Amino acid sequence: MKKYQVKVNEKRCKACGICIGLCPKEVFGEDYLGKAVVKDDGKCTGCKICELHCPDYCVEVGETA
Amino acid sequence: MNSAYEKYFRQDRLPHIWCPGCGNGIVLSAFARAMEELNIDQDKTVVVSGIGCSSRATTYVDFNTLHTTHGRALAFATGVKLANPELNVFVFMGDGDSSAIGGNHLIHASRRNIDITAIIIDNNIYGMTGGQYSPLTPTGKKATTAPYGMVERNFDLCELVKGAGATFVARGTVYHAKQLTDLIVAGAKNKGFSVIEAVSQCPISYGRRNKMKNALEMINWQKEHAVNVKAAQKMNPEQLKDKFLIGELYRAEAPEYTAEYDKLIERVQKGGK
């Protein structure tokens, strides 16, 4: 099975919560400001719903070997 | 950052000014991915916009850009395209910008069938000026200028441009972001006037007044209420109640304006009448 690495650029994140809510695998958690943080990207299936729907282009899903 | 975003966005302009959860950013990323798919020449592409939240888009994309007056983006774009028909011209407009202030430009660009791709971001409200109702605010929904609910009927923008003569009409949503990219690609390939209505969300000016408390709730609303045009053929009117259609709604063949104009120039230069 392929593995994925999820990165969030926290400087760009505006804490809208879209990635946290749309992720089917609960990869994201939120910090004290409501910004997205990667909780467990081992669960990521690479659907990229977070990357496609981030209005601020701060989520990136990459494949790891 | 996604390679398409790195290539087609002006990095020094990011982060953008749009509110948290605004759909404009998602439409713009769908646009960037469409440009990557088309492998478009940035120097041969012009992006034009009018005024409003959606029209801030031209600030962030790395093409030849033109930020024009309210509602008149299509008029400027028509000039650009006629002066140099080789250029690829894209126009970003909002729902109020395109259907109220620029309503006439929209129907006449459709009538002429000029080779422009218009992306209309429909967030149901005038977001930048504080949430006044637009011609696309659904009946009964609240806005600052309709505190007891909108009494007027709203436009079906896709039907409007179809009736006015556009040759490619499609509707997508922010939730269906991949499909939105495909629609923008198909619209760009169409030789004629293409309209893509992108149903978006304004959580600050529209959502909060209409019992949708955040962007996520609004995106999930789109997911539940959008029906693909192919799936809709198998559904009965009862099932389609409260739903809206997405996908490629209409396609037609018609003479393209700049091509017709070039023919006219050639004919007159040869002394024809």
Image (tube, coloured by chain):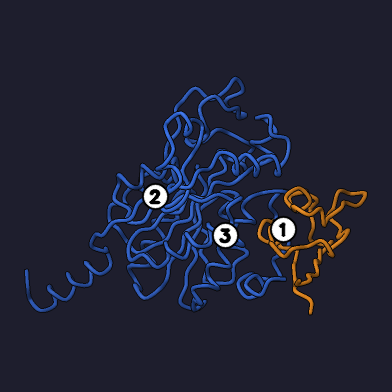
Chain colours: A orange, B blue
Chain letter of the residue beneath label 3 in the structure image:
B
Picture layout, residue B111 above or below residue B239: below
Disc nearer the start of the sequence (2/3):
3
Q: Is residue B109 visible?
A: no
Chain letter of the residue beneath label 2 in the structure image:
B
* Structural distance between the alpha carbons of marks 1 and 3: 12 Å
Residues packed near mark 1 inside 10 Å, few (<14), some (14 to 19) or many (20 plus): many
Amino acid at the residue labelled 3:
Lys
Q: Which residue in the structure is indicated by mark 1?
A: A50
Q: Residue at the spot x=26%, y=60% of the render?
A: B253
**Quadrant in which residue B251 is drawn:** bottom left
Q: Which residue in the structure is indicated by mark 2?
A: B249
Q: Secondary structure at mark 1?
A: helix
Residue B30 on image: x %, y %: 58, 61
Q: Residue at the spot x=78%, y=62% of the render?
A: A44
Q: Which residue in the structure is indicated by mark 3?
A: B178
Amino acid at the residue labelled 1:
Cys
